[in-house]
Amino acid sequence: MTIEFRGVTKRYPDGTVAVDDLNLTVEDGTITVFVGPSGCGKTTSLRMINRMVEPTSGTVLLDGKDVSDGDPALLRRGIGYVIQHAGLFPHRTVLDNVATVPLLSGWDKGKARKRAAELLETVGLPSELGKRYPAQLSGGQQQRVGVARALAADSPVLLMDEPFSAVDPIVREELQDELLRLQSQLGKTIVFVTHDIDEAVRLGDKIAVLRVGGVLAQYGTPSEVLRHPVDDFVASFVGKDRGYRGLSFLSAEGIVVEEVKRVEVGKPAPGPSDDWQVAVNAEGQPRGWLRPGSTVDGELAETDLVAGGSLYLQGSPIRGALDAALSSPASLGVVVDADQKVLGVVRAQQVLEVIEAPSLSS
């Protein structure tokens, strides 16, 4: 479902302009991220889609139909909405929280709860959590429940207002991965609000950068915004390291994966070596590094290892390869397959040579 803003302005009685003549189209089945500093109108713009905020002038269209035509309650019931801290009802179980919209739509309780249980599985939560109350869940679990509840309407449109900003960085990345996985399966039209340019770049098919006063500064793909900011404001907002972020959109074709010495945790430790050795578990997945010259008595344990850097998934963009090499204590980036098994290593210098090659940098 396409969302279109046509000359949309929101002006409050005191004269404050939150959104100023916004014109953009959110394409069907894509994730569009509204990003910008505090006070730029990104949340106001989002809430005008489901009429939690009414525009002062202009029109918001869903598949060509003016959202102001009709009952706002019915409109909201048909649009998924996820907010920070999940916004769950504390006195209802997880299952009943997710079943809220189907029940409001007239479903019988048994059917609504069955649908809720299916959605918990969809967002990666075990079914037994359905009997718990929100306070008994972690922050990340609560946000997953919030996403499940938003999906319960089975609407083609999903609005997400800084949904992952209240959780720690590790959980946040897991939730971002989960959203991308769900989107690949469901193909919703998603409008996502964040103040974090890295989150915007990771999630968005398109990014709308807003400046204070609710003015749209730039609207384009993450690559376009990073590599060709339209003015000093956008350049400053996306950061001085935007060139590095831009590597997220470049292929790693040409990267050479080299062999590396491997040792296995739980097996008799090898003798001292002049080289760094990557330690793996029985499944061949990386567990850390064994320093050159290390002497270990008996079986190799994880306590004998130096923590590794990030891992590079073979075939993913070149930024991951460079990050893996630069973050590794051995200056060797560990390359893994889809099962997280070690394939070999990459060197930072070789990655940089590929980046600087004319075919890639042009």
Image (cartoon, grey):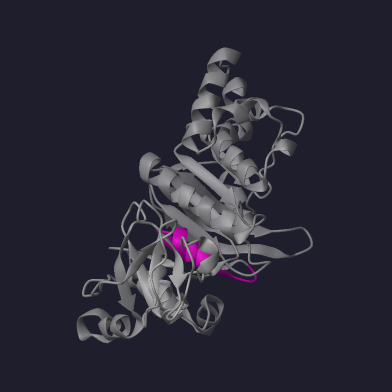
| Along the line of sight, the residue nearer the viewer: 182 or 69 | 182
Is residue 340 in sight in this rendering?
yes
Give me the residue at 48% from left, 70% from top. 296
Q: Quadrant of residue 278?
A: bottom left
Q: Quadrant location of the C terminus? A: bottom left
Q: Is residue 280 above or below residue 246?
A: above
Residue 332: % across, % down: 37, 77
Q: Nearer the viewer, residue 297 or 243?
A: 297
Residue displayed at 77% across by 29% down: 91
| Residue 290 at x, y percent in the picture | 44, 72
Q: Residue furthest front?
A: 297
Q: Is residue 248 visible?
A: no
Magenta stretch? 198-213
**Closest to the observer, 176 or 48:** 176
Q: Give left or right: position of 169 versus 241.
A: right
Q: Is residue 207 rendered magenta in the image? A: yes
Picture quadrant of residue 357? bottom left
Q: Is residue 360 above or below residue 188?
A: below
Q: Residue at x 79, y 62 (%)?
A: 14
* Quadrant position of the N terminus in the picture: top left
Where residue 263 appears, as percent x and y from the top left, is: 37, 65
Residue for point 69% across, 37% down: 88
Relative placement, left or right, of 224 versus 159 is left
Number of marks in picture:
0
| 318 sits left or right of 8 in the view | left
The percent position of residue 161, horizontal first and vertical second, equals 61, 52
